[in-house]
Image (spheres, rainbow, N blue to C red):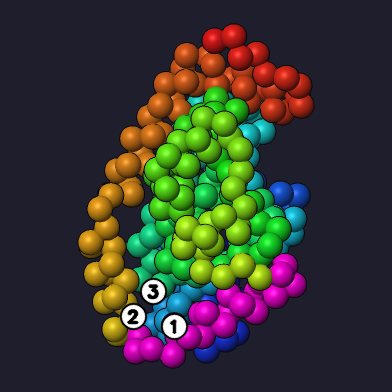
Amino acid sequence: MPIHIDRKRPGIAEVVIDHPPVNALDVAGWYALADAMTAAGRDPERRVVVLRAEGRGFCAGVDIKEIQARGDQALIGANRGCAAAFAAVYECEVPVVAAVHGFCLGGGIGLVGNSDVVVASTDATFALPEVDRGALGAATHLARLVPQHRMRAMVYTAEPATAAELHAYGSVLRVVEPGDLVASALEVAELIAAKSPTVLRRAKESLNGIDPVDVRRSYRFEQGFTYELHVAGVADEHRAAFVAKRPTDTSR
């Protein structure tokens, strides 16, 4: 399974993405992640969830090869699966600490941007390559990690930001060496887990209630343009070029 839950530590659940080679999730994987986050948050023995990954990077987003192979149904499934997973992180009944290493791309930004606390390793980079893939989405979540104009530049250019940069903005709590990432994230989780479980759950609910942006509606609005690009035929060329590892025709 690409997603599993570790409940070995008192009060803490670790939801782990492990889908080689690059943790790009297919439709089933996004729904599995949504289910795991929801289950971990509803467990009365858990006071905090650590969301992390194994392998080369945190998450490379959606499985573009699946979309190319299955067409419309896979695209619709990926859109809905991502929306479900992002919402499950945001609406998890307890605080979520994201531990990010290596690349955090596309859907990975949606997961991290909807987390409560972010710890990253020095090798972590954050990017939305959607424009290069003929898609849109997760600017909603990137805007929770970087300032508005930086977010726009990152969307248009598809260039990454470093963990150090996000730490300077205050959106990443700690930047540590890769070998220390899991231990550091668990240390933060233990600080949270030491608090009253009743108060923590109400704190999470109250903080979501005062957010200035409805992340569900905002993200679904973005996704509508992804499908528009798909219908227009532009997205197919971008995805085909990515799968074939060739230059993209950007004439239209």
Q: Nearer the viewer, residue 133 or 161?
A: 161
Q: CA distance from mark 2 to mark 3?
A: 7 Å
| Magenta segment includes 182 | yes
Q: Amino acid at mark 1?
A: Ile
User: Which class describes the residues within 10 Å of circle 1: few (<14), some (14-19), or many (20+)?
Assistant: many
Q: Which residues are magenta?
A: 177-197
Q: Nearer the viewer, residue 182 or 169?
A: 169
Q: CA distance from mark 3 to mark 1?
A: 10 Å
x, y percentage for residue 217?
Answer: 29, 43
SS of the residue under disc 3: loop
Residue at horizontal 68 percent and vertical 62 percent from the top: 122
Contact (Cβ within 8 Å) of mark 1 with mark 2: yes
Q: Does residue 17 lie above or below 69 as drawn?
A: below
Q: Amino acid at mark 2?
A: Leu
Q: Read off the residue under disc 2.
A: 200
Q: Does label 1 or label 2 sit earlier along the sequence?
A: 1
Q: Read off the residue under disc 3.
A: 94
Q: Read off the residue under disc 1.
A: 192
Q: CA distance from mark 1 to mark 2?
A: 8 Å
